[in-house]
Image: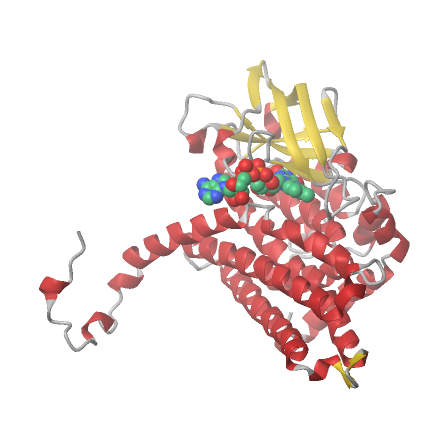
Amino acid sequence: MFDFMMTEAQKKLRDEARAFTKWVPRQLILDMDAEKIQFPHEYLQEAGRRNLLGIRLPRQYGGRGLTWVDDGIVAEEIGVASYSLACLWGVGADIVCEAVIEFGCEELKQAVVVPLLKGEVFAAEGLTEPRGGSDFFGATTYAKKDGDDWIINGQKRFIVGAEGADWFLIYAVTDPDAPPHRRMTAFMVPRTEGVETKYIYGLMGVRGGGAGRLVLKDVRVPERYALGGINGGYQVFVRMMIPERLGTAAMTIGSVRPAIEIATRYTARRKAFGFPIQMFQAVGFKVADCALKLDAMRSMVYTTACAVDSGSVNPGRVRRMVSQSKKFVTEGAWEIANSCMQVVGGIGYTSVYPLERIVRDIRLSMIWVGSNEIMQLIIQNEWYKEYFKVLSGEDVRDVEEDALNAHETEEKVYE
Ligand SMILES: Cc1cc2nc3c(=O)[nH]c(=O)nc-3n(C[C@H](O)[C@H](O)[C@H](O)COP(=O)(O)OP(=O)(O)OC[C@H]3O[C@@H](n4cnc5c(N)ncnc54)[C@H](O)[C@@H]3O)c2cc1C
């Protein structure tokens, strides 16, 4: 995030996050990437000890009561060590715990949020199913009422942190006959009888973060573990789109930043034809474009965070801004990672530099927490709604009139 826009308190917070990222053992990153480690408990425990989990959540549950701008500052620094660690840092505390704080009962807040923010337990979020992730309302995991409890059956796929999770936020169909927005419930499910996780995916990147399949067979949960009540899952889903997507955008900035640092250092030192390759515009311009994109990405995340923090921006516009940030940042990061690999040449394609891991890791960002095609759908929907409901009604200049033949209305044919 931009240092010149930070308050002194925010600079201190950034430095705390930087110190934590500096602490991360190099061997942990290597062992996760080699999948010798499948879930880095020690990382989350240390984040909890430093009170760097769920910093936006209320102090009474162990958070710091900070803002989305603060969260963006920390997330960028967290992303620097590795994308896999950043995903875990965000999923349990920023996503699941926020859902529990907003929609859960006091018992769940004490059982999940308080120990999770201390790094003592972990929680994962399960939306995606083998039959599809984008079509959220087409979920087939279902729950049936049995006395005061609900019995859940189904499968979830690609669940970050599944391997180490003690709790799962699970969306299940509870009223199959209701319209899509009223048929789902978000349950908090402890790792209990009938819950099975399998670490089976040979992921291209983002390894060692416990991403697994989750199988639920006759899992019994009390009705009070339903966040936002039975059939209230859609409200939870909509709310969680902010931490999922804005959080992803912020941490992706951090995860691609090292690629620019490596490319800058390398191109300033490496010589070809008697000159540092930075002097060749084909090289130097690429690095300059990366710096430009990184700052544009930061600007977008910062303004979106301000919009969410204000609480006064129309929810549709917030949805558009959050989706724009996710799409713009993740596509920008992918371009940056590739450009940085290009200017470092053949050695960038080896494990001598971490560029190849960054490229593999960053690729996920355009797919997960809602693919970028789904972001485009949301942006399109919200833009048209916003334009015709709000912007077209504003008392501003009619720009269509500023054409020589604007009065030729019979030429303005629409059908
Ligand atoms: C490493 C990893 C970690 C993940 N972590 C989690 C997690 O913790 N929790 C979780 O719930 N999920 C997680 N996911 C799942 C991820 O969010 C989904 O993979 C993603 O939402 C896409 O769903 P899908 O893979 O089923 O693809 P599909 O939904 O089958 O989509 C396939 C393609 O079709 C496109 N498409 C689908 N519908 C439309 C449409 N209407 N318009 C235009 N294009 C469309 C998609 O954009 C995509 O390109 C993770 C995935 C991975 C790989």
Residue 293 vertical position relative to residue 74 in the rendered view, above or below: below
Does any portion of residue 257 appear in the rendered image? Answer: no
**Residue 274 shown left or right of residue 338 in the figure:** right
> Residue at point 72% right, 35% down?
212
Q: Position of residue 376 (x, y in %)?
A: 46, 52
Q: Position of residue 104 (x, y in %)?
A: 60, 37
Q: Say which quarter of the image contains residue 159.
A: top right
Which quadrant, please, contains the N terminus? bottom right
Q: How many numbered discs sit on the rendered protein?
A: 0
> Residue at point 80% right, 53% down?
47
Q: Position of residue 179 (x, y in %)?
A: 40, 28
Q: Position of residue 327 (x, y in %)?
A: 53, 56
Residue 238 vertical position relative to residue 408 in the rendered view, above or below: above
Does any portion of residue 35 appear in the rendered image? Answer: yes
Closer to the camera, 58 or 359?
359
Closer to the camera, 15 or 39?
39
> Residue at point 25% right, 62% down?
393
> Residue at point 68% right, 34% down?
168
Closer to the camera, 409 or 307?
409
**Residue 195 shown left or right of residue 141 in the figure:** right
